[in-house]
Image (cartoon, rainbow, N blue to C red):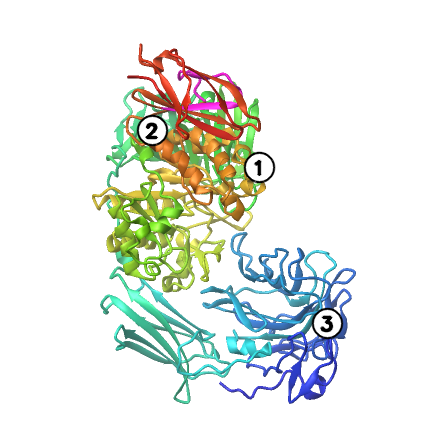
Amino acid sequence: MRDAFPLVKSLSRRIRPVACATFTLVLLGWMGCPDGVGAAEAPVPPGRVFYASFDDGFDAIEGRGGKTAQVEGKPRIVPGRAGQAVLVGDLEGSAGLSYPTEGNFSLERGTIALWVQPVNWSGDDRRNHVFFNAWPEEGGLFSLYKYTSASWGLTFFLDPGDGPRGKLYCYQPVADWRPGEWHHVACAWSHREGMHLYVDGRLVKSALGISMPRKLLKPTIRFGGVWQANGGRTLLDEAMIFDRMLDAHEVARLAGQPAELPDAESPRDVPGVALAHAILGQRVLAHVYRDALGEAAESARLELLSGDGQRVAEQTLPLKETTTLLELDMKPLPRGRYQARLTLFSGGKPQAVETLALRKETEETWESAARIAKKDTLLPPFTPLKVTPAQGAQPARIAPYGREYLLEGSGLPSQIHSDGHPLLTGAVRVVAEGAGALAPKRVALERATEVQARLTGGLDGDGIGVETAVVARYDGTLWTTLRFQPKKPVRLERLRVEIPIREAEARYLAYIAMGRVDNKRLGYDALPAGEGVVWRREFLPSIWIGTEERGLGWYAESDEHWDTDGEEALTVERRGGTALLCMNVIRQPREVTEPFTIEFGLQATPVRPLAPDWRANQWVSSAEITQFFLHLRKNPYPRPEVEGKSPSGKVCYLYAYHDYFTSTLPKDPEELREMISRAKAHGLFCTPYTDTTYLPESFGDLWMREAELRSLPGARAVSYGPVSNASVCHNGPFGDWFVWYVAHLAREYGSNGIYLDDTWTYGCMNAAHGCGYVGRDGKRRPTYPLRARHETYRRLREVFAATGQPFWITMHMSGGRVPPLPTYGDCLLLAEERYHDVAKNPDYCENTTPEEWRASFATEAWGIPVVVLPQFKMNANWMKDPELAHRLMAAVVPHDAMIWPIFSETETVTSYRRALMEFGIGEADTRFIPYWKKDAGLECAHPGVKLSAYQRPGKLLLLLANWTAEDASGVTVSLAPALLEKGAPTRARDALSGEAVPVTAGGRLVLAVPAKRVRLVEVVTGR
């Protein structure tokens, strides 16, 4: 690389005052300011396509795509850091300068560098200050600016316009910035490498591996301007744009900082070069820009070196005009550690070297991964599916565990039972106004096994016929396809499917539509009272309606052929004793001439039997996870502080073994093996962290199959570490990749469980793997691949069941319980969705209502244990506050939910759990008596106190929760004779303090319950 670059400004321009406290000292090209900002004039790196010094006005000095400025508002030329600068921001309105985009700026790669000076603001203020903006043509934003949040500060932001979850960003607090001070800022980006943010010549943040969007841009880019009118003013000077990602030393020199040229043969991060390992692709890949170093390189050599430094594979290629992809096949190589090494050459001499350490841990390929866990056998703890064909007037009967679906001739349920309770007041029916009467055909059983059955039925009318196909599974899902066949052109006034649910079975409602960013994306609460339509929404993929004991779920993947306008695609209407869930497919008159299909699923709950001792599977606290299992290299065993001890709990979340959160191989395989081995030695379930929705963009597997893997609209996660993660869809090959990954953790490392994060599905419209459809307006719309993700989770359960050993699958849902995705988990980790509610009010006795607790956290309703994830993590003081922990437990304990001692004052949390476990709630003979059951033999006369209890032979544990702000004194509790052994004396004590509590022989207690507290009182009811 050359060093004799032209200087930014001529010497004559440098001999003038600048905006420092004193004049500039000029000596052999050196500029010094007492505030320390000034430094050596920077040589200009190759690739500069735009340069505006503002010394001679608003127009740029250089501009490959145009130099003429379009003036917005009233920017002004004023004395700058060196020569003149431009004053932008809020100058009686937005003031900025726009220039042509084409030739000057590209989203694929580049660097923006400039000097900025706050005029009347500081780096910790709560206002936006814009330095540079560009805009994708179809929506989105590329921006370098100071954000309103002081914790973010200087922000490099990219919204590609793919959707609300596709944003990318790097940020760095700049709270020490003050008015009148100059700072050099730069952002650099490149396809496959990612985004870098620099402050005063120093790299401060990165988001790595990003597949940069290649989108058309709006005609102009802009320096300055305002986001919101706020009076903020900023000086900009020496604005430059490059058509390549600059190297760190090049940015440092632009900022006037000393920086040595990197050694050509020493490995480093070379801008314009990206290396990746495709695990299932069994490849090493290199993506190279010919002008990565500024001057065009001639060739590149990709080598693979074994652990002892021997070259085992090599490819050398001349570089193409723009980019070249090199690759090496790893299939023939043995498992082990390797180093990939990419060298750029010019004139036969090496110019730069980049390396990547990697391991071959598996012989699996995409093809073999697609075959993992595909036996589709009956999995524990489910029971075989039983199917009885229709006989005479008797409907067909489908009986998974604990439930019964009766299908009439239409192929739709005439009744659904859960635990013997009827859920419907009548048959599910199709209402087609304008098509005449629809008469049922005959339901027929085509085939059935213990895991799956297929049945058909239908409806017939004068104008239209309906063919019904039903696939029933042992997990209780009932997937129904309705194919509407017009016999002639038919004008349908309305088309809906009605599901009439008994009012007594419709106390609560939960729904979800992840991917939205408004308050309609999820919810759970009491079903609104009243008559008529009490709830309405646009199309959502999943709804559950039920009670604390059971319910009925509805789900669908697509609103194709639905009317999509308005808020009444889905409604719940109260009519007498019925809560009518309606799929309002056609709401405006429509001429129907061609066949069309509507599909949906039903799933009654609970979906599986609860293990009698399920409460024994408590979670190990965050503190004990660290004490016993984490950081085994930094803090190796022996660990005297835990010698002879065991963690409190059964389920152990493992992390900190990978470089960043998501599905990555461990950075130290032996450390992960030791973590798992030590946890299993304590009899624990090991649940290493994985994410079910994202893949790191630096993965070669994503490079090779990106078009098939990615979900669209795209989503990004850049907060899990330095590497950007892109959303991927289970309808594509990612399901196979993820099943392989979890199977690998089980087989290679011995894990007997898994922690699945981000387990709900998002909308996708990627036609490459069959998602989405083109609506009647000609626009592509998303579908929700629920069944594909559900199948992934089923396969994971098959993977662990095949080991023949006990296992544990944690599903972190963060959005409530709706069908069908919770089905194959062993517990549901919930309540992270309360984050924003807790941020507004950390008091759990106030931020979550009893109805919300019962709608989403009552374990019996689904047959899957619920674990509450506390949400004080936004405030370090809250996490240490015992008072808030007491209030949290006052809310959780009466609802029979487990809790993970994390993000809270864990000693208080574990003190309650310790008392519960000492009573024996983890034993198989435990029965929970909830406060909402009025005929259970427990009576509390105080209106502000909720009374639940655990019962075991000979004893009760009373759970008295006072959610009010006032102490409750004289609280009278009466125990029905059925809860006492006849003639046996009774005694009681506070399970936390051990203090005696007076109790009469007739089973009556009078006690006090402090405000926002739960008391645990153990009552001995037998000898």
Q: Which residue is mark 3?
A: 86
Q: Between residues 933 and 490, which one lies in front from this camera angle?
A: 933
Which residue position is annotated with label 2? Answer: 919
- Residue bounds of the magenta highlight: 932-950
Q: Disc 3 or 2, which lies upstream in sequence?
A: 3
Classed neighbour count for the residue bearing mark 3: other residues with Cα under 10 Å, few (<14), some (14–19), many (≥20): many
Query: Which is more N-terminal, label 3 or label 1?
Result: 3
User: Which secondary structure, mark 2?
Assistant: helix
- Going by the numbered disc 3, the residue's amino acid type is Val
Between 719 and 984, the residue placed more toward the observer is: 984
Q: Are marks 1 and 3 in contact (CB under 8 Å)?
A: no
Question: Callout 1: few (<14), some (14-19), or many (20+) C-alpha neighbours within 10 Å?
Answer: few
Q: Residues within 10 Å of mark 2 (few under 14, many from 20)?
A: some
C-alpha distance separating marks 1 and 3: 49 Å
Looking at the picture, how far across and down is residue 849, in whole percent? 53, 31
Q: CA distance from mark 3 to mark 2?
A: 73 Å
Indicate whether 609 appears above or below 563. Answer: above
Whichever of labels 2 and 1 marks the residue nearer the N terminus, that label is 1
Q: Residue under label 1, please give it.
A: 567
Whether residue 592 appears in this view of the structure is no
